Amino acid sequence: MSEKPYQALYIHVPFCTSRCSYCDFTTQAVERDDPAMQTYVEGLIGEILHHARARELAEVETIYLGGGTPTHLGSRLLTSLLYALSIYVPLADGGEFTMEANPESLSPAIVKDAFALGVNRLSLGVQSFDDEVLRFLGRAHDAERARGAFHIARERFENISLDLMCGIPGQSEASWEATLAQAIELGPDHISVYPLAVEEGTPLQVRIASGACAAVSDDRQGTDLERAETMLAQAGYVRYEISNYAKPGFESRHNRAYWTSLPYLGIGRAAVTMRESGSHRERVKDGVVVERLDAAQMAAEDLMLRMRLSEGATEEFLREKEALLPALPTVLDELCELGLIERDGRGVRPTHRGWLCGNEIFFRILALAP
């Protein structure tokens, strides 16, 4: 166990109905009766039990069951996994337990059982309410099914998040605005907005490379993101992180654990664990250390992650990091001059331009401790 206790737990389910054209996650498309899913779930439960016996789950405050598509497991397997989590991970009152779901596999039975077994937040992968765009992405649902899944979820859950995607080849500005409008009309409590990333080796990347379709420009993606911010703000959603909006009080605690560098445990295929002692931080995947940071690198990463948040970093936080990063004041001055961050007596935070050009902020901060 890490010197600092794990405060967040991520469980990975690598199965889907079908793989989307843009997906490069560790997932595979399998039939609902594929025995590989039962074998995998049994393995997950064994790992959960192992970590519980090692007393590594006692201080976990948030659980995130993601994938892949956890709801593709079906009611029986999903219920057995959720039951194990309810027994071995004693979330305190106020703890957050999120489960990802896709519209094509979310049923009233799954909603009922998940709620009864402690899930209190549902993240629904919608991406678009335009059927043509959904077909282009290779999604397994249409807009009507997405709306229906939301209403099924709302029968039990008061905390629902929708994932939406912009900057998609062939997606018009009118289509994007219509998707935003339909999402707002449904009234979820949290909305994540992501520009499409074209990942190497995906079917989408192959199509773009062959000329079958054209990638969307950064400027157009920026326009889509600005339109989302405007419409969501008018509807009462607050952007609290680069890609995330919430009604007050419904910000994701699990994601915030990542952005504030709290140690987290990942269970399942390709799930990442972050463990930390006073002098170093490690990330482990499938039992192998894939990254090791020293104290200065930890300080740079901590500040970089804080700059994802709209609130930024306090002056006290900056003074603490400056002890390990002597060039930090110079870099902050440069970022202010570029109009990417703003600074007052309370601390620093990204500007509107910095929100759209976040990679420039992140690169300069991480370069402080190569």
Image (cartoon, rainbow, N blue to C red):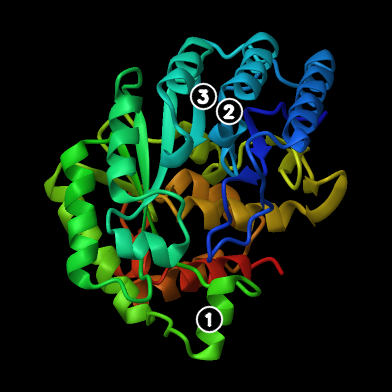
Mark closer to the chain start, 1 or 2: 2
Residue 346 appearing in the image: no
Mark 3 nearby-residue class (10 Å; few <14, some 14–19, many ≥20) = many
Q: Which mark is residue 366?
A: none
For label 1, the residue is 207
Total number of numbered discs in the rendering: 3
Mark closer to the chain start, 1 or 3: 3
| 309 horizontally vs 365: left or right | left
Q: Are marks 1 and 2 in contact (CB under 8 Å)?
A: no
Q: Which mark is residue 74?
A: 2
Q: Which picture quadrant has residue 205? A: bottom right
Q: How far apart are marks 1 and 3 (CA)?
A: 38 Å
Give 308 or 49, whichever is nearer the viewer: 49
Q: Distance between the residues labelled 1 and 2?
A: 33 Å
- Indicate the amino acid at tag 3: Phe
Helix, strand or loop status at disc 3: strand
Q: Which of marks 2 and 3 is in front?
A: 2
Q: On the rendered image, what quadrant is the C terminus found in?
A: bottom right
Give 2 or 184, whichever is nearer the viewer: 184
Q: Residue visible at 53% across and 81% down?
A: 207
